[in-house]
Amino acid sequence: MDHLVHFEIHADDPARAISFYTTLFGWQVTKMDGADYWLLAATTEGEPGIDGAIMARQGPRPEVGAPIVGMVTTVQVADLDASLSRALELGGDVALERMTIPNVGAVVYVHDTEANVLGLFQPDR
């Protein structure tokens, strides 16, 4: 069966993006030898998930408020309000207000420091 195995975050300033994601989620980062490509260890042991990378953006930065081109990466968090607050402290801003998904949980979309849209999701327990 086909399944998602990797994600990439495009960044105007990779160092700034690395700081945002490692501080917000505690992900580990490793620079690939000979490339401007930083691997992200984004999974938690014993939990389903995928790892990804940060790379320098190829082309213009997306305009805030423009329709989303591509996919939105959503991260499951333990406390949506705390994660949203931390994302805003780190330079993000709200892209789509918090929404409740009945019998599933709640999600909010933020722009990261690179104007990418990131979903934060807290499941109902």
Image: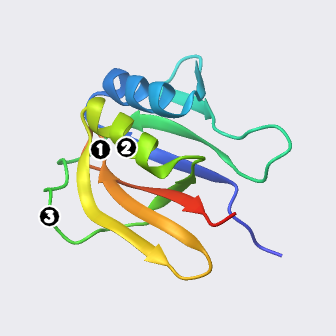
Q: Residues within 10 Å of mark 1 (few under 14, many from 20)?
A: few
Q: In percent of the image, x 52 and y 59: which residue is there?
A: 121
Q: Earlier in the sequence, mark 2 or mark 1?
A: 2
Residue type, numbered disc 1: Gln
Q: Nearer the viewer, residue 83 or 72?
A: 83
Q: Nearer the viewer, mark 2 or mark 3?
A: 3
Foreground label between 2 and 1: 2
124 vs 83: above or below:
below
The local secondary structure at tag 3 comes to: loop
Placement of the N terminus among the 4 image quadrants = bottom right
Q: Where, by quadrant of the figure, is residue 124 drawn?
A: bottom right
Which of these two is toward me, 99 or 45?
Answer: 99
- Residue under the point 45% across and 74% down: 100
Q: Circle 2 is placed at which residue position?
A: 10
Which element is circle 1 on?
loop
Task: Measure the alpha-carbon separation of dots 2 and 3.
Answer: 17 Å
> Which mark, residue 58?
1
**Residue type at numbered disc 3:** Gly
Residue 54 position, x and y percent, is 46, 35
Q: Farthest residue to the bottom: give it.
A: 102
Q: Earlier in the sequence, mark 1 or mark 3?
A: 1
Q: Counting other residues with Cα less than 10 Å from the Cα at mark 2, is it few (<14), some (14-19), or many (20 or more)? A: some
Picture layout, residue 24 above or below residue 6: above
**Looking at the image, do the residues carrying marks 2 and 3 touch, with CB atoms under 8 Å apart?**
no
